[in-house]
Amino acid sequence: MSEPALPLVTGADVESAAALLAGVVRRTPLEHSRALAERVGGPVWLKCENLQRTGSFKIRGAYTRIARLTDVERAAGVVAASAGNHAQGVALAARELGAAATVFMPETAPLPKLAATRGYGATVHQLGDSLTEPLVAARQFADETGSVFIHPFDHPDVIAGQGTVGLEILEQCPDVATVVVCTGGGGLVAGIAAAVKATRPDVRVVAVQAAAAAAFPASLVAGVPVPLASMTTMADGIAVAAPGDLTLAHVAGLVDEVRTVTEAELSRALLFCLERAKLVVEPAGVAAVAAVLADPGAFAAPVVAVVSGGNIDPVLMMKVVQHGMAAAGRYQSLRVRVPDRPGSLAGLLRELAAVSANVLSVEHERTTAQLDLGEVEIAVVLETRGPDHAREVVAALQRVGYAVSDG
C-alpha cells in the first residue's frame, strides 16, 4: 500500500461521528449466511445497511456532514447531486436538522428513489442521463444561492460518518478477518477501512466495483483520479466515473484489494440475497456478496460482506431476477425442429413436462431458409432447476429424436 498524499480520517474521527449519530441511525443487523459460509469454509455475515433509514448507509455521512455545518451555513440550505441514495440521505438529514435541501437527479433516476427524496421534503430537479449534468447544476446552484454543496463521498465528515458501519462490524463480529465493501466513489470503503484499521490493522478490507464502472484500478495505478470514458451497469448506486482525491488516498493507504464483478455476477448475487437471505437488495448494494459468490476461496473467514442498499425499482428487480436466473442456468432457450403437422407441438410439450421443464413461452417459425419443406421450428423458453437439469432436458429431447439447438 502506497503512502497517502492527503491526511486520512482517523479512528477517533469515526468514533466522534458515531457519537453524533447515536439515536439518529439504526444499528443495522449482522445476519449469518449459511449458504455463503459453506462456500467460503467459515462464517460469513451480511451487514444489512439495506435496512438502514432511507434504505442505505448514506444517511450516516450526510447527517454527519450537515450536522457539523454552522448555523449560518445550515440556514442557507444544502444542495446535492445523486442518482438516489445520497439524495435520500441528504433530504432526510436536512429535514431532521432544519435545513432546506435541493437535490439534482438524472432523468433516469429510479422512481422509488425520486419519490422518497421528495417525500423527505427536498426540492428535486431532474436533468441529463447521468450524474454529470446534475453535479454541474448542483455546484452552480451552490455558487448562485450560497447553499452548501454536500459531496456524496469526497469529504472527511462524510467518510467519517460512513465509517461508523465499520465500528459496528467490529463490535458485532470481533473476530472478523475480512470485510468486503461495495464501492463506487469510495466513501463507504474509505470510512470502513479508517475505522477497522485503527484498531485491527490485521483485518483485510476489500473494495468491490462493478466491472463496467470500475474507476479505482486505473486511478490507483496513476496515483490521481482517472475518469472513466463511459459506464454501463445496472448498479447505478456505484456507477461513479472517478473517485475523489480524498477517497483515492484512503483506498491507496488503507484498502488491501480492489476487485470487480460482472453484470451476471451482480444478477446472481441479487437473486441469491432474495432467495437465500430473504433480503431485498439493489444491484449496487449486492456487489460485495457477488464478489464472495464469484470467488469464495479468496476471502479468509470470518467474512463480513456489507449489503449497502436496498432501494430497487420493482420493474428493475423483475428484470434483474430474470437475468440472474438466466446467469444461474435456470432459464433455457431452445429451438426444436418438428414435422409441420397437427399434434407436433403437443408432443413436444409432453416430453418437456416429462422432464419437469416449465415452459415460459413458445413461438413457431415456418419461413426460414434453413427449414426443410414440411418442417417447423419451435422456439421455447424454459425454467429449469439449474445447469444439470438443463442438460437433462436437452438429452431427453434428443433421445426421442428431436433436433435441438440453443435459442
Image (cartoon, rainbow, N blue to C red):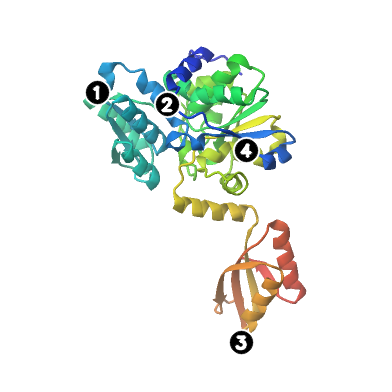
| Residue assigned mark 3 | 342
Q: Where is residue 257 in the image (x, y as percent from the top left)?
A: 62, 27
Q: Is mark 2 on a helix, strand or loop?
A: loop
Q: Position of residue 365 (x, y in %)?
A: 56, 76
- Label for residue 24? 2
> Which is more foreground, mark 1 or mark 2?
2
> Which residue does the image show at 60% across and 22% down from the upper left?
171
Q: Where is residue 346 in the image (x, y as percent from the top left)?
A: 63, 80
Q: Is mark 1 on a helix, strand or loop?
A: loop
- Label for residue 283? none
**Left or right side of 322 for 385:** right
Mark closest to the chain's N terminus, 1 or 4: 1
Mark closest to the chain's N terminus, 3 or 1: 1
* Distance from the alpha carbon under mark 3 to that under mark 4: 50 Å
| Residue assigned mark 4 | 291
Q: Where is residue 225 in the image (x, y as percent from the top left)?
A: 47, 26
Mark closest to the chain's N terminus, 2 or 3: 2
Q: In the rendered image of this protein, does residue 328 appear above or below residue 365?
A: above
* Distance from the alpha carbon under mark 1 to that under mark 2: 23 Å
- Give the position of the N terminus as an image quadrant: top right
Mark 2 is on which residue type? Answer: Val
Mark 1 is on which residue type? Answer: Ala
Mark closest to the chain's N terminus, 2 or 4: 2
C-beta proximity under 8 Å, tags 1 and 4: no
Q: Tell me if residue 74 can be seen.
A: yes
Mark 4 is on which residue type? Answer: Ala
Q: Which residue lies furthest to the front in this view?
A: 23
* Distance from the alpha carbon under mark 2 to that under mark 3: 68 Å
| Residue assigned mark 1 | 76
Query: Quick one: 231 or 394, which is closer to the camera?
Result: 394
